[in-house]
C-alpha cells in the first residue's frame, strides 16, 4: 500500500512539474506594460483614466481602466505597440513601444488638464 501511495504522489509531482514548465514557457512569450497615470500639475493619481493598447499589425487590442491609485498592468505578446492614455478633462498622451519577450516596461504618464476643451455648464 505504501509503495502505491508514493508512486501516486511521485506521479502527481511529475505532473505538476510538467504543468509548471508549460506555464513558464507560455509566459516567456509575453511582455508586460505597467505604469501609473497622474495629474501633471498636482502629481495625484487619475483613477478614471483609460489605457488603450493597439498592436501595429492590428492583431492585438486591449483597453484597461486604471486602478484607484492610477496604476495599470497588461500582459501582451512580443511586438510593436501604440499606447493611448487619456481621461475626461485631460489631453491624451500617446506612446510607441517595442516589447520583447520577457520584458517589462514601466510608464509614468503625466496628463495635462485640457483647459482648451473644458466647457462651463
Image (cartoon, grey):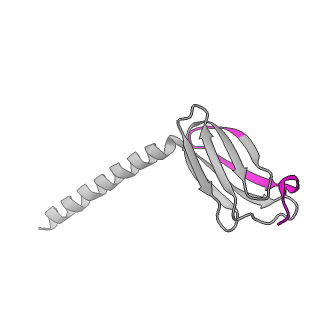
Q: Position of residue 40 (x, y in %)?
A: 85, 58
Q: Quadrant of the C terminus?
A: bottom right
Query: Is residue 52 visible to us here?
Result: yes
Q: Which residues are magenta?
A: 96-121
x then y, percent, for residue 61: 56, 43
Q: Is residue 50 above or below residue 42?
A: above
Report the residue at 69% width, 55% height from top: 35
Q: Is residue 120 left or right of residue 59?
A: right
Residue 119 sits inside the magenta stretch: yes
Instruction: Choose between 88 and 9: the one closer to the eye.
Output: 88
Which residue is at a point 29% across and 53% down the rendered structure image?
15
Taking the spot 84% from the left edge, 53% from the top edge, the residue there is 117
The total of numbered circles placed on residues is 0
Q: Nearer the viewer, residue 100 or 11?
A: 100
Q: 101 or 119: which is nearer to us? A: 119
Quadrant that contains the N terminus? bottom left
Quarter of the image for residue 49 reads: bottom right
Q: Most extreme residue toward the top, as rendered?
A: 57
| Quadrant of res 119 | bottom right
Residue 34 appears in the figure: no
**Residue 104 rendering spot, x and y as whole percentages:** 63, 47
The answer to whether residue 12 is left or right of residue 33 is left
Residue at screen point 88% across, 61% down: 41
Position of residue 59 in the picture relative to residue 21 (left or right): right
Residue at the extreme left of the image, as rendered: 1
Q: Residue 37 colored magenta?
A: no
Q: Position of residue 120 (x, y in %)?
A: 85, 64
Farthest residue, direction front: 121
Amino acid at each position: 500500500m505504501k509503495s502505491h501511495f508514493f508512486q501516486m504522489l511521485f506521479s502527481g509531482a511529475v505532473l505538476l512539474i510538467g504543468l509548471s514548465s508549460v506555464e513558464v514557457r507560455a509566459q516567456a512569450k509575453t511582455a508586460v506594460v505597467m505604469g501609473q497615470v497622474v495629474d501633471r500639475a498636482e502629481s495625484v493619481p487619475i483613477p478614471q483614466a483609460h489605457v488603450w493598447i493597439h498592436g501595429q499589425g492590428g492583431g492585438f487590442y486591449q483597453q484597461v481602466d486604471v486602478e484607484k491609485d492610477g496604476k495599470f498592468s497588461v500582459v501582451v505578446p512580443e511586438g510593436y505597440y501604440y499606447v493611448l492614455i487619456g481621461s475626461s478633462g485631460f489631453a491624451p498622451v500617446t506612446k510607441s513601444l517595442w516589447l520583447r519577450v520577457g520584458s517589462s516596461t514601466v510608464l509614468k504618464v503625466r496628463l495635462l488638464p485640457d483647459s482648451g476643451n473644458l466647457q462651463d455648464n
